[in-house]
Image (cartoon, helix red, strand yellow):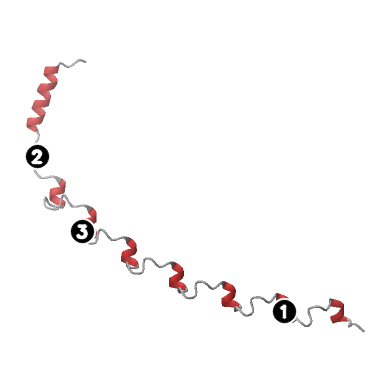
Amino acid sequence: MKFSATFVLATLAALSSAAPTPGKSVEDYTIGPERRAKSVEDYTIGPEKRGKSVEDYTIGPEKRGKSVEDYTIGPEKRAKSVEDYTIGPERRAKSVEDYTIGPEKRAKSVEDYTIGPE
């Protein structure tokens, strides 16, 4: 089925004249012509806050440079290790034997404890 160019042009002209003249768009009804150029960020956040990041809202710009350790431990304690908290720096050099047996008994063998040297 072949259509001539004249037929196609005549059909298109008839259809275009039957179509309603363009009026308001969907955006004009839901948003309005004065707001149509605005982005979603302008509606939900506002142009004055759009430059801020999520960290600015949840933490604040003055605290953003701090790490998680600064919040949970504090900068003065961050250099300390877990051993410093649980044992203490004065006991960290000691071994398990120093705690359970003591340095004066550590040189003795199991036989010395159970039987005795004599």
Q: Residue 105, how many percent across, how many down?
A: 79, 81
Q: Earlier in the sequence, mark 2 or mark 1?
A: 2
Comparing labels 2 and 3, the label whose residue is closer to the camera? 3
Residue occupied by mark 2: 22
How many residues crowd mark 1 within 10 Å: few (<14), some (14–19), many (20+)?
A: some
* Residue assigned mark 3: 47
Residue that label 1 marks? 98
Q: Amino acid at mark 2?
A: Pro
Nearer the observer, disc 2 or disc 1?
A: 1
Residue at 14% across, 21% down: 8
Image quadrant in which you'd find residue 52:
bottom left
Vertical placement of residue 60 versus 116, above or below: above
Tell me which amino acid carries mark 1. Asp
Q: Mark 3 belongs to which amino acid?
A: Pro
Q: Position of residue 16 (x, y in %)?
A: 10, 30
Q: Residue at x 11, y 29 (%)?
A: 15
Q: Position of residue 47 (x, y in %)?
A: 20, 58
